[in-house]
């Protein structure tokens, strides 16, 4: 296992030097955040980012993410040129020697929460989600009412997108994913890059939009679409852990044994009423994720890939990007590394 942390580039308040000072951290997870969705990445830009990271004696371990253009997910005739662009980006990542690309396949919206600073009894804050609250949000005037949703859509664009998605049943999303992977996986293989799909967060339909990467059966199905080591998974314990019927240790065992987990996101959640949760400190006792069970299954199966503490809380008065402060993620990294060290093979 290689411990990594996400870094948002030069504009991130958390610096590479900060991250380097956290015990056990060896690598960085980052992206070309300034390149528009659907524009192919240049190898020279990925190499520049890799070299910046290397100046701090850290590896560029994972690209998270290359965004998948909406036309690809919708399966429109325009998708082919966006798939070509995605392939070109994957090739550039391979040229720079970055071994893993994380991506997700969620319609319209990426991760979704209803609170970015839910206060906890100890004075810390974290991200949280309540489905009833979400469904009460009025989208008729665009995405302005959504907390934390960066890529804004105005009312017109959002209405058009939602109308397009209304024609897509879940099976149609699977078809478009298969079409995408059939073209991208061979390119990734040739570039020596492993693709790692991130589960949907939260793992259920929102605003009437289908979400398909939600449980073990879905992960199995993704792997069956194209049988290749380059077609793999990001196992995110926080995303999948929002559902009580997801046994995360069993998933780590099953997909770890197959060697198809290319990237680990470790985050703990405390589930509330059905379809509600809040993010909590990483140790198992604070939430519903059996972190020791997950890591034991991975270690038992020889997991050697990158792992990162996913979101952290905001503690000690820190301000910054929701979920991506320094302090609690640093505690998460050392907790996870300690847990890992303590598990005997
Ligand atoms: Mn995640």
Image (cartoon, helix red, strand yellow):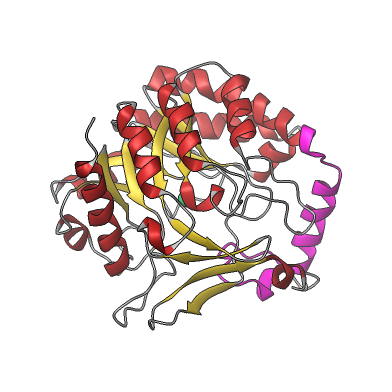
The percent coordinates of residue 241 (x first, y second) are 53, 51
Task: Look at the picture and state if 267 lies above or below 118.
Answer: above
Q: Quadrant of residue 123?
A: bottom left
The percent coordinates of residue 244 (x first, y second) are 60, 51
User: Considering the image in quadrants, where does the C terminus appear?
Assistant: top left
Q: Quadrant of residue 46?
A: top left
Label total for image: 0
Q: Is residue 60 left or right of residue 17?
A: right
Task: Look at the picture and state if 118 lies above or below 60.
Answer: below
Give the residue drawn at x 44%, y 30%.
253
Give the residue drawn at x 49%, y 53%.
238
Q: Is residue 247 left or right of residue 214?
A: left
Give the residue drawn at x 48%, y 65%.
279
Give the residue drawn at x 79%, y 64%.
156
**202 or 180: nearer the viewer:** 202
Q: Which residues are magenta?
A: 143-171
Task: Look at the picture and state if 191 lies above or below 285.
Answer: above
Q: Is residue 63 visible to the viewer in this orientation of the structure? A: no
Q: Is residue 267 left or right of residue 170?
A: left
Q: Is residue 180 visible to the viewer in this orientation of the structure? A: yes
Q: Is residue 196 magenta?
A: no
The percent coordinates of residue 70 (x first, y second) are 67, 45
């Amino acid at each position: 296992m290689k411990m990594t942390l996400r870094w948002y580039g030069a504009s991130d308040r958390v610096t590479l030097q900060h991250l380097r000072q956290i015990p056990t951290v060896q690598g960085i997870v980052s992206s070309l955040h300034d390149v528009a969705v659907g524009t192919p990445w240049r190898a020279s830009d990925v190499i520049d980012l890799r070299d910046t990271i290397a100046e701090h004696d850290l590896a560029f371990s994972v690209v998270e993410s290359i965004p998948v253009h909406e036309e690809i997910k919708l399966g429109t005739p325009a998708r082919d040129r966006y798939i070509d662009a995605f392939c070109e980006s994957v090739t550039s990542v391979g040229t720079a020697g970055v071994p893993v690309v994380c991506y997700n396949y969620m319609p319209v919206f990426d991760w979704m929460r209803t609170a970015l600073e839910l206060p906890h009894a100890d004075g810390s804050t974290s991200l949280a989600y309540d489905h009833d609250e979400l469904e009460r949000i009025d989208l008729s005037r665009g995405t302005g009412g959504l907390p934390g949703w960066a890529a804004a859509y105005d009312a017109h664009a959002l209405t058009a997108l939602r109308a397009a998605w209304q024609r897509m049943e879940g099976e149609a999303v699977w078809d478009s994913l298969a079409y995408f992977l059939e073209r991208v996986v061979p390119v990734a293989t040739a570039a020596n890059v492993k693709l790692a799909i991130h589960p949907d967060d939260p793992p259920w339909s929102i605003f009437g939009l289908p979400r398909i990467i939600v449980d073990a059966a879905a992960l199995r199905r993704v792997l069956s679409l194209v049988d290749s080591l380059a077609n793999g998974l990001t196992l995110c314990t926080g995303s999948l852990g929002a559902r009580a019927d997801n046994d995360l240790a069993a998933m780590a065992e099953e997909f770890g044994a197959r060697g198809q987990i290319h990237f680990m996101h470790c985050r703990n959640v405390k589930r509330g009423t059905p379809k509600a949760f809040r993010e909590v400190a990483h140790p198992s006792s604070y939430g519903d994720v059996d972190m020791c069970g997950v890591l034991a299954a991975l270690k038992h199966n020889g997991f050697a890939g990158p792992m990162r503490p996913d979101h952290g809380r905001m503690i000690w008065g820190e301000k910054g990007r929701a979920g991506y402060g320094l302090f609690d993620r640093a505690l998460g990294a050392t907790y996870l590394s300690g847990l890992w060290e303590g598990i005997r093979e």
